[in-house]
Image (cartoon, grey):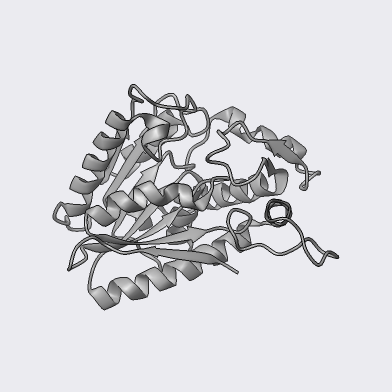
């Protein structure tokens, strides 16, 4: 079962519809500040909760009940690229149908894994297309050490403790199976035709990101002329020093978040340019 949550636009006539997808082992509702930013800009938002992250869980096999955290972690241990792809595709279909009813553009707004799953769907499914992309620290290019969990591929249920702040993480750690699903998505992305992502894109990332590669994303943007790479510098008041987290005011500081929202609003509201 997939959990979906709508955030209505704060305007009488919506300017677009956005599919919003969270990162790996990040609570889906941590994307609410981004959705609020988009809603204030006149965009309807559909927040997707990928399996193993939100309330779309069931008790472990053989048990009639379990705590939410135990059931969620067990679900996380059984995820796959195919499962997340199907959930992303189902949410896309709902968002696309709504955008057509409104006669409005369809956007992807994804953080890390969420950006990868959305972009990968556009690369692999001929009927999928986003009109604009807002990508926060997208896992489209990883630093070499981000691939170390591959060494544990024979133990998919093993949980690697998370270093993310507790307020953001969905589970106490990330199973190897979830990392393998991410790597499978990244492999599919690497084999895709990038011309299918020829749409205006705003890529926001801290150059000191510990997981996503700023240099790798810069090279990707060189191949996609309508993609704009925007470095994010954390400002005073940032509660966390995890550079990969760039999703709200506490993670980057209020001044930096305000600047990000200004950039996102301008990007959403600028006239569309013709496809090349």
Q: Is residue 50 left or right of residue 260?
A: right
Q: Is residue 182 left or right of residue 40?
A: right
Q: Is residue 142 left or right of residue 8?
A: right
The answer to whether 133 is drawn above or below residue 145 in the figure is below
Q: Nearer the viewer, residue 219 or 52?
A: 52
The image quadrant that residue 102 belongs to is bottom left
Q: Nearer the viewer, residue 174 or 128?
A: 174
Any part of residue 125 in sight: no
The image quadrant that residue 274 belongs to is bottom left
Q: Residue at x 64, y 45 (%)?
A: 171
The image quadrant that residue 26 belongs to is top right
Q: Nearer the viewer, residue 109 or 68?
A: 68
Q: Residue at x 44, y 42 (%)?
A: 138
Q: Position of residue 189 (x, y in %)?
A: 50, 50
Q: Residue at x 60, y 69 (%)?
A: 1
Q: Position of residue 180 (x, y in %)?
A: 67, 47
The answer to whether 79 is drawn above or below residue 206 in the figure is below
Q: Nearer the viewer, residue 256 or 78?
A: 256
Q: Position of residue 123 (x, y in %)?
A: 44, 58
Q: Outermost residue, bottom direction? A: 101
Q: Outermost residue, left direction? A: 271
Question: How many numbered marks does the figure carry?
Answer: 0
Q: Outermost residue, right direction? A: 62
* Image quadrant containing the C terminus: bottom left
Q: Residue at x 43, y 38 (%)?
A: 137
Q: Position of residue 78 (x, y in %)?
A: 72, 57
Any part of residue 250 in sight: yes
């Amino acid at each position: 079962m997939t959990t979906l949550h709508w955030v209505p636009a704060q305007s009488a006539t919506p300017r677009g519809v956005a599919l919003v997808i969270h990162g790996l082992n990040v609570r889906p509702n941590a994307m609410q500040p981004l959705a609020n930013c988009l809603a204030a800009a006149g965009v309807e938002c559909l927040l997707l909760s990928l399996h193993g992250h939100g309330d779309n869980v069931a008790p472990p096999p053989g048990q009639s009940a379990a705590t939410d955290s135990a059931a969620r972690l067990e679900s996380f241990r059984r995820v796959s690229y195919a499962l997340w792809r199907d959930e992303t595709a189902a949410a896309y279909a709902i968002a696309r149908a709504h955008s057509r009813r409104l006669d409005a553009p369809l956007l992807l707004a994804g953080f890390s894994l969420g950006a990868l799953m959305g972009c990968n769907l556009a690369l692999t499914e001929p009927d999928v297309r986003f009109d604009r992309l807002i990508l926060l620290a997208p896992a489209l290019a990883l630093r070499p050490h981000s691939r170390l969990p591959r060494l544990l591929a024979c133990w998919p249920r093993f949980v690697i403790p998370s270093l993310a702040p507790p307020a953001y993480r969905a589970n106490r750690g990330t199973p190897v199976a979830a990392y393998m699903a991410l790597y499978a998505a990244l492999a599919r992305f690497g084999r895709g035709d990038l011309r299918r992502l020829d749409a205006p894109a705003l890529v926001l990332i801290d150059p000191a990101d510990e997981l996503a590669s700023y240099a790798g994303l810069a090279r990707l943007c060189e191949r996609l002329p309508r993609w704009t790479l925007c470095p994010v510098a954390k400002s005073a008041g940032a509660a966390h020093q995890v550079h990969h987290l760039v999703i709200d005011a506490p993670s980057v500081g209020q001044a930096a978040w305000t600047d990000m929202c200004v950039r996102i609003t301008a990007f959403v509201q600028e006239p569309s340019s013709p496809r090349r």
